[in-house]
Image: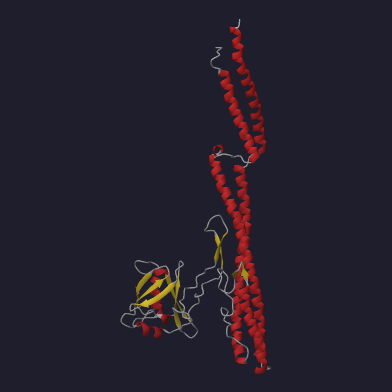
Amino acid sequence: MPVIATNTAANSALRYLNLNSEAQSSSLSKLASGSRITKASDDAAGLAIGTRIQSDVTVLSQAATNASQATAILQTADGGLARISDILQRMKSLATQSDSGSVTDSERTYIDAEYQELLEEIDGIASSTRYNGVSLLDGTGQYASSSANATVSSNWMTDAQYSDITDSADADVFTITTSDGNTVTYTVSDAYDGTTGSVSLEDIAASINAGDTTTPEAANVTATVETDDDGRQRLVLTGVDGATVTAMDDTTGTTLQAVGMLASDGTTIVGGSKTGVDFMVGTTSTDTINVSIDDVDSTALGLAGTSVDTQTNSETALTALDAAIDAVIQARAEVGATMSRFEFRSETIDTTSENLQSAESAIMDADVAAEKSELSSADVKTQAAIAALSQANQMPQNLLSLLKS
C-alpha cells in the first residue's frame, strides 16, 4: 500500500545499511589490528583462553631472562672457583716442597711467605667474586649455600659423658625450641638402644624422631647420632620445613650444650639447610630453580692458620689442602650441575614459548584473506544499501505527483 506518512522501505534500507556498515568497520578493525578478536563480543571464550596463553608467553619471556641471568651468576662463580682451585694446587706444591728433607726451616720460611700470600689471595678472590655487587664465594651474599651457623658441632662426647649429665632427677625430661615458635617437651624412653639404666644418645635421638601425641614430627626437628673413628658420639639436631633449632633445655632450664647442640664457636647449630636464591623459570611461582653456592674462603676450606714453615706444619697443611681441594671440586660440580639444569630449562622455555605463541595465534590472530573477503562483501552490501536507501527516499516524492493531477 503506497503511503507517505511512514517510509517503511527507507527504514528497512537504513537498518541494512547500519548492519553492513558495522560489519565493514569490524573487518577494517581486525585487518588494522591483525587480531581476530577486537572486542569481547567477537569471541568471549577465545578471548579468555588467548589472554591466558598470552600471559604465559609474557612470563616465559621473563623466565628465559631469569635463566640467562642465573647462568651468568654461576659462570662468574665458577670462574672464581677455578682460580681458587689453581691456587690450592700451587699451595699443595709448596707444602710438598716444604715437607721435603732437602730444605731447612730457614728456607721453609721463604716458602711459607708465598704460601701465606696465596692463602690471602683465596680470601681476596672469595670476597671479590661478585655479581651485581653481591658476593658469591665468601658466604656473606644471598647466594650462600647455607647459613653461617650450619656447621656441625665439633663438641664430640661419649655416651658415658652424656649419662653423667642426664641421670639427674629430671634430666630425662627436656624441651626443644625451634625458630618457628614450636616448643615440645620430651620424656626420653630408655630402651631405644636395647639397654636400660642409662640414657644414651640413641635414646634421645629416637625419642625425638618418634615425636609425641600432638605433633607427629615434633617441633619440626629430626635427630641423628654421629660417631667418629674413635667411637665418640654426638647428637645432631636438624630443623626441617625451614625451622631451625634454637635451644634444647632440661626441665630446670639448663641448656644442654654438651650434646653437640653448639658449634665450636658457640653458635647454635641450625641443621645446614639450603638457602640461596630461587629463580622463577616457569609460569608459576613454584616453578623455580635454586642457586646456592658454597663458601670457599680460607676459613670455610679449613686452611685458616695453616703454614708450611716447618716440616710438621707442612704435613698438617697437606692434609688440609687435600680436603680443601675436594671441597672446591664439589663446589664446582654443584655449580656446573645447576648451570647445566638452567641451560636445559632455557631450551625448554624456548620450545614452550614457541608452541604457546602458535596456539595463541590460532585463537587470536586474524585470517587476513578471510577478513579481506568479508570486507569486500560488506563494502558491496553497504553500497547497495546506500543505493536502496536513496531509491526509497524518492518513493514519497513520486507519490506526491498523484496529488498534482
- Which one is in front, 189 or 240? 240
Given the current orientation, which residue lies at the most extreme left position? Answer: 169
The residue at 45%/79% (across/down) is: 262
Q: Residue 192: in sight, yes or no?
A: no
The residue at 63%/78% (across/down) is: 122
Provide residue 228's location: percent of width, then percent of height: 49, 82
- Which one is in front, 110 or 363? 110
Q: Quadrant of the N terminus?
A: top right
Q: Is residue 3 above or below residue 71?
A: above
Provide residue 191's location: percent of width, then percent of height: 35, 77
Q: Quadrant of the C terminus?
A: top right
Q: Residue 47: in sight, yes or no?
A: yes
Q: How is this picture coloured?
A: secondary structure
Provide residue 72's location: percent of width, then percent of height: 64, 65
Given the current orientation, which residue lies at the most extreme front position? Answer: 404
Q: Quadrant of residue 280?
A: bottom right
Q: Is residue 58 above or below residue 108?
A: above
Q: Is residue 207 above or below residue 403?
A: below
Q: Quadrant of residue 378?
A: top right
Figure disc tally: 0
Provide residue 181's location: percent of width, then percent of height: 40, 68
